[in-house]
Amino acid sequence: MNSSPLTSFVATSSEDQQPALKIAPSILAGDFANFKHELDRLNQTTCSYIHLDVMDGHFVDNLTFGAPMVKALRPHTDKVFDVHLMMKEPEKYLDEFIAAGSDIISIHREIKGDVIAILQSIRKAGKRASLAINPNTAIDDIEKYFPYVDQILLMSVHPGFSNQNFIPAVLTKGEEVAAKIRTYCRSYDRSRLADAVQAKCIDLEIDGGVNAENIIPILKSGFNVIVAGGYVFKADDLSVPISRLEQAAASLAGLNV
């Protein structure tokens, strides 16, 4: 079977293929004073996920919102809540974000706590566990986390602030991680992961500086979950930039959207 990253963009039942493309608009790039309105706008689009950036003012300098915001927004959409915890000690607040209605929870590789134990706690709660990795963090030992995650999130900007320039080096890192994921997902024994939230395999997500100019090399590198903030929310009609991202993926896969 062709193991090209492009198979990521086609939804099939094959165990050897990664999940299909998911677009995850980052609501933090919208109107901070009216997230409910922004959520209503996103509900009119074909995006799969809503990306929520939680910053604690310690792991990163900026401060955004906490679990109460996630809880307040949860009743107003059926879309997947992809919650990115840029927090120094996420384990202290994990139960709150789980109860608030998070579907996917990302914690950072760079924290001082027991990363694997926290990922296990996320899965035991019936949520999807995701490991976020900063641009300057090595990926030499990334495979050791694969049994505990449903998603790997590679940052393509330095975390903490919006409207940064895309870091091209993440494309090479993405290719390396995507290859490792494909190898792992063809070989591991799913029967040993009875406590896991089962996905077709492990999603590879990118976050930071994504736009129409760099989406093609991003997709070619193997990413299948695309976080887009400013590129989406600067449009009057949010469906337009989202459709452009979807069309780019479809063109690579030889499909029509």
Image (cartoon, helix red, strand yellow):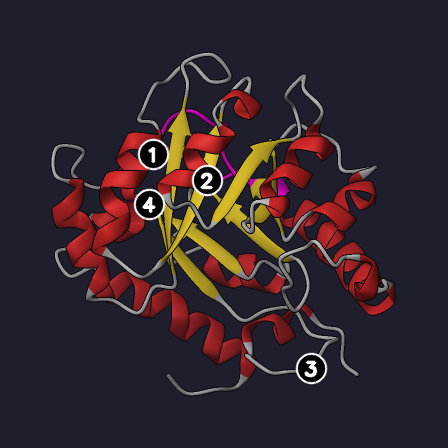
Residue 29 horizontal/vertical position (percent): 27, 39
Mark 3 or 2, closer to the camera: 2
3D distance between C-alphas at marks 2 and 1:
29 Å
Q: Are marks 2 and 4 in contact (CB under 8 Å)?
A: no
At label 4, counting other C-alpha atoms closer than 10 Å, the crowd grade (few under 14, some 14-19, many 20 or more) is many
Q: Provide the secondary structure element on which disc 4 rests.
A: loop
Q: Are marks 1 and 3 in contact (CB under 8 Å)?
A: no
Q: Are marks 3 and 4 in contact (CB under 8 Å)?
A: no
The residue carrying mark 1 is 163
Q: Residue at x 60, y 83 (%)?
A: 12
Q: Tell me which numbered mark, 3 or 4, is placed earlier along the sequence.
A: 3
The residue carrying mark 2 is 98
Amino acid of disc 2: Ile
Specify start and end residues of the magenta stretch as a single range: 155-170
Q: Which numbered dot is residue 229?
A: 4
3D distance between C-alphas at marks 3 and 4:
31 Å
Q: Work out whether residue 214 or residue 65 is closer to the camera in this orientation and state it.
A: 65
3D distance between C-alphas at marks 2 and 4:
24 Å
Query: Against 69, is 57 above or below?
Result: above
Mark 2 or 4, closer to the camera: 2
Mark 2 or 1, closer to the camera: 2
Amino acid of disc 1: Asn
Could you tell me if residue 235 is visible in this image?
A: no
Q: Residue at x 43, y 35 (%)?
A: 97
Q: Provide the secondary structure element on which disc 2 rests.
A: helix
